[in-house]
Image (tube, rainbow, N blue to C red):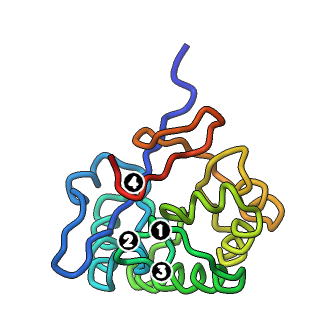
Amino acid sequence: MGIKHKALINVDLGEAYGYWKMGPDEQLLPMIDFANIACGFHASDPLVMMTTVHLCKLHNVKIGAHPGLPDLQGFGRREMKLDPEELTAITIYQVGALKAFLDRENLPLNHVKPHGVLYGMMCRDYEVAKAVMLGIPKGVPVFGLAGTNMEKAAMDVGVPFWAEMYGDVKYRNDGSLVIDRIKK
């Protein structure tokens, strides 16, 4: 009996900012299938986004937007209360920023994967999840945690949902993620 499905690897990339380097992006690219590129609110800047998109193209890595809360100093790991309209708007804004760089390279937007505490908030809070889903372009899938409000909201608003699991994040006994403010 052969392997039925290959495990596909998605990695958060482009999380540098200015002169500050974050992660071994160039070393990871040959080993991954999908890149979730930071869109400027929790990390990244225009030059980092442009460079990361180009490097992904060179390595045939599919590219997704990695929108987060507007929290550069806290790296998108501090929870904040935003109205649903704000959550939709910050998603449209960040995805649109990445989409401009993708268009420049003639590449499609493959997916969206929310970042950090926004991801956790979406898993727990249906209204947060729905608001973010409404900011995702039609037909573009979202990566998320199965069996959560994230999956339910995606299905309710017609966003294709691709379930994922983490190899580098802790899970609680109920299957929910532990998103540390500082990775341990």
Mark 3, residues whose alpha carbon is within 10 Å: few (<14), some, or many (≥20)? some
Q: Secondary structure at mark 3?
A: loop
Q: CA distance from mark 1 to mark 4?
A: 21 Å
Residue at image mark 4 = 11
* 149 vs 131: above or below: above
Per the rendering, the mark at residue 78 is 1
The residue drawn where x is 41% and y is 60% is: 35
Q: CA distance from mark 3 to mark 4?
A: 21 Å
Q: How many marks?
A: 4
Q: CA distance from mark 1 to mark 3?
A: 10 Å
The percent position of residue 102, horizontal first and vertical second, equals 44, 78
Residue at the extreme right? 156
* 6 vs 156: above or below: above
* 98 vs 143: above or below: below
Q: Amino acid at mark 4?
A: Val
Per the rendering, the mark at residue 74 is 2
The percent position of residue 123, horizontal first and vertical second, equals 66, 55
Residue 4 visible? The answer is yes
Q: Secondary structure at mark 1?
A: loop
Q: Earlier in the sequence, mark 4 or mark 2?
A: 4
Q: Earlier in the sequence, mark 3 or mark 4?
A: 4
Q: Amino acid at mark 1?
A: Arg
Residue at image mark 3 = 70
Pick the front one: 138 or 125: 125
Say left or right for 59 vs 122.
left
The residue drawn where x is 37% and y is 78% is: 72
